[in-house]
Amino acid sequence: MTSDHATSMTGDHAVDIDRHVRVYITVFVALMVLTIVTVAVSRFHLPVPIAVTVALLVAIIKGSLVACYFMHLISEKKLIYAVLALTAFFFVALLALPIVTVSDGYWIH
Amino acid sequence: MSDPTAVTPKSHVAHEIHHEELGFWRKYVFSTDHKVIGIQYAVTGLLFLLFGFSLMMLMRWQLAYPGAALPLIGQLLGEARMPGGTMLPEFYNELGAMHGTIMVFLGVVPLAVGGFGNFVLPLQIGAPDMAFPKINMVSYWCLFLGGITMLGSFLVPGGAAQSGWTSYAPLSVIAGTGQTWWLIGMIFLITSSLLGALNFITTTIQLRAKGLTFMRFPFFCWAQFVTAFLLLLAFPPLEAAGVMQLMDRVAGTSFFLPSGLVVSGQALTNAGGGNPLLWQHLFWFLAHPEVYVLILPAFGIVAEIIANNTRKPLWGYRSMVYSLVFLGFMSFIVWAHHMFMTGMGTAMAAFFQTTTMIISIPSVVILTALIISLWGGSIRFNTPMLFATAFLPMFGIGGLTGLPLGLNIADIPLHDTYYVIAHFHYVVAPGTIFGLMAGIYYWYPKATGRKMNETLGKIHFWGTFICMNVVFMPMFIIGMAGVSRRLFDAGTAYNFAQPTMHWNAVSSWGAWTMALFQIPFIVNFFWSIRNGATVGENPWQATTIEWSAPSPPPHGNFHGSPEAYRGPYEYSVPGAATDFVPQYEA
Amino acid sequence: MDIPYTVEVRRDTGLTNGKIGIWLFLASEVMLFGALFASYILIRTGAPSWPRGDTILDVPLATFNTIVLISSSVTMVMAWASLMRRRFGTYRIYMGATILLGLVFLVVKYFEYGHHLRLGEFPSSNNFLAIYFTLTGLHMLHVFGGMVVNAYFWGPGAKLWKTNPVWFTNRVEHSGLFWHFVDLVWIFLFPTLYLL
């Protein structure tokens, strides 16, 4: 989706953009539906672990749609994928390790 | 110093740069030229190193002669801090917290990354400037604002931050106004580093010269590249933590305040339910990678200088590069070795102990490769090389003494003692700072067109080298005797501390003597600007691309676009006419 | 002096400097919000009890805001697509819509916050509110920052379209990436705080 030369407008032709626009509208509708789904499910007041799992799953799907299609990640270059993969690893470590560390040893007290 | 931003007559004719002469402010103050910004960072860093050092020299009086009045200076510092010339505990804590903060965030990082990274990196990769010159300028001014904030914090009621450079909750949350300023200052500094990091990464990937593949990079470039990733991804959690601590202090939240906290007999009225350990996790998530931010640029500088002054390629370049990358990666998952004493269970202690032991391997690989690089070299012991060579055993001591700290059982008697202080000072002071000194002597000719004086340099080196050991070696002894760090009275109140108390005076005299030995350096630095021996492009007969630019380089750096034709350390190539074949020569 | 690959891509990476720069910045933002989410996890699991989001917060209002933000993400990408189709006028409309929707989001949050504060529900009241205000507050600052940048590209910055349309398009794309990221954070924030 990035332009390839300095002087021409874009590497994509108008047809390509049309195709992309159709994708954007589709994704928009999907996001709306999923928003309604996640709010509706929350009304059932499911037990917390299940509620969290469902909410997280829906959020991940919505997030992936935004990332892949609005942010064009689905057709990005390897370098960007590499940076994001690295970030994802550290993100998971940051989310997981503190809580595991604080819980571990809890039983010793 | 001649103007680094003067336009070269032949540069970039393809696009007409209408370089109307920039006014004084745009050329020297709000410059977007990486060389000017690099010098701004370097000078700022050096000034703060001096200031941070001065704070410590004050502390060393109290440590050597606890409770004694400090002649002259004691009076100058006023009754609020030094009544009758004797130091108050609060002042001692202020000095301690700010010494650490300033040395790490306002001294070493700005000099090592902002200074050396900015000045040398684009030159070494053959680029005309950084990828984002305006963001580069903004990053310096963020640092400047952060520095002003930190300095300003000394003047607020209650003084500057006093809760250690680590600002542990809940003490930091209930501390005086200075801590709020510290937090705000940190936000500026973190922003500066984040902006700088994304600039360095983009520049290294995109603006390297034709033919300069990653495995032909000078090791210095690799070091700055990995460092930038550490800054980019590790700093934000501290920024978040800083915001939360600000919320606790200013908005009355209880992120880090546990329930039922009683201060001076009064129960706190906050909601409670917070977790002091949360602060520790977020702080150390940054602060561990931060220590690698402190050492990696020094590794890079030392590598360059060793290759150049042994007239040999670096031994094990490939393994050094892989180690560097692996080290950077591992640095994100070792942090809780700073928290072994917080009550974590054996499983997580084992996890962090293991990752910590693993991370020592790449460090050892890099150090060993640098040592082996000396073997069979035709060594020139100029001042940069003296500092670079001394770095090796000093960092060796620092690194090896870290091992017991990384093992959770061995850490039990050593945690928070002077042993820790000795360990980390060995890596940062005769470690990193020696690397930075080496770098200053080495690249000064490129930046100014003149060499620094060798005699003054050697006096600076030998005095500093001896004094560093006099200051820090005794601290291992004191620490192993069990004396805690951050003790205002150096352990006077404890029986077990008495046998080793006398070492404090030794360290103090070492520190004050070391201060004297910085005078030749400061004099040399300024004197040589006008009076040093003038040099051409390549006074060290070096092989890397920065040595093909004029000294100092003009705006745009090179006449035309450099190209890399070979690896970075083609020294003593058999059959070559000279003992070095530059990377940039066809 | 011209910095290479500002507008044209570098062949071996296939990227412009700005594209790499914005993604690196977003990576750091992932870590920033990640730290706050990690804090949320630690605080919530350490709390003896934790209110369900809908007992304190206004779910219908936040759902509306979610729809607003997602819509603004669509208008943002459409703004960029318009530039790719060389339709500057249409770009202006879509970008304007994005800014307006951002403004709606902020106004709703203003009312939301105001309501809580009037009820005496402060960040200091309990940890749920503390993390709620901090997370949404920081997010709000990012919405505001994105709006400022977008407003620049709608207004004074749009001059660049005439002199360097490719560069302008790229810059709008990068601004869009930031805006989508802000939307992405909200997609996770909303269920975490309001629905769980």
Image (spheres, rainbow, N blue to C red):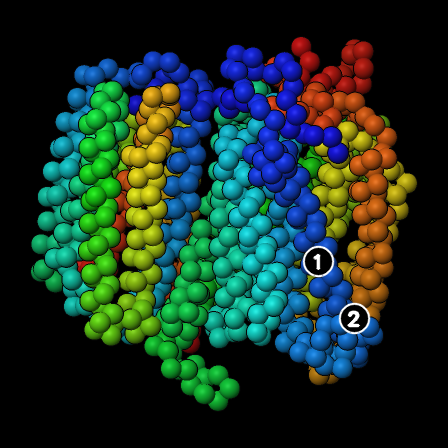
What residue would you read off at disc 1? B51
Q: Amino acid at mark 2?
A: Ile
Up-down relation of residue B446 to residue B424 (above or below) = above
> Residue at 31% across / 35% down in the picture?
C155
Closer to the camera in the image, B144 or B195:
B144
As drawn, is A39 to the left or to the right of B582? left
Q: Is residue A27 visible?
A: yes
Q: Position of residue B167 (x, y in %)?
A: 53, 66
**Quadrant of the rendering where the N terminus of chain A is positioned:** top left
Q: Amino acid at mark 1?
A: Phe
| Identity of the residue furthest to the right in this view | B455
Whole-Å distance between the Cαs marked 2 and 1?
15 Å
Q: Quadrant of residue B539?
A: top right
Closer to the camera in the image, B405 or A64:
A64
Closer to the camera in the image, B63 or B312:
B63
Are there few (<14), some (14-19), or many (20+) residues within 10 Å of tag 2? few
What residue would you read off at disc 2? B73
Q: How many marks?
A: 2
Q: Position of residue B442 (x, y in %)?
A: 76, 34
> Residue at 27% across / 37% down in the picture?
A67
Badge 2 or badge 1: first in the primary sequence: 1
Are there few (<14), some (14-19), or many (20+) residues within 10 Å of tag 1? some
Closer to the camera in the image, A74 or B333:
A74
In terms of secondary structure, where does tag 1 sit? helix
Up-down relation of residue B15 to residue B519 (above or below) = above
> Residue at 46% across / 22% down in the picture?
C5
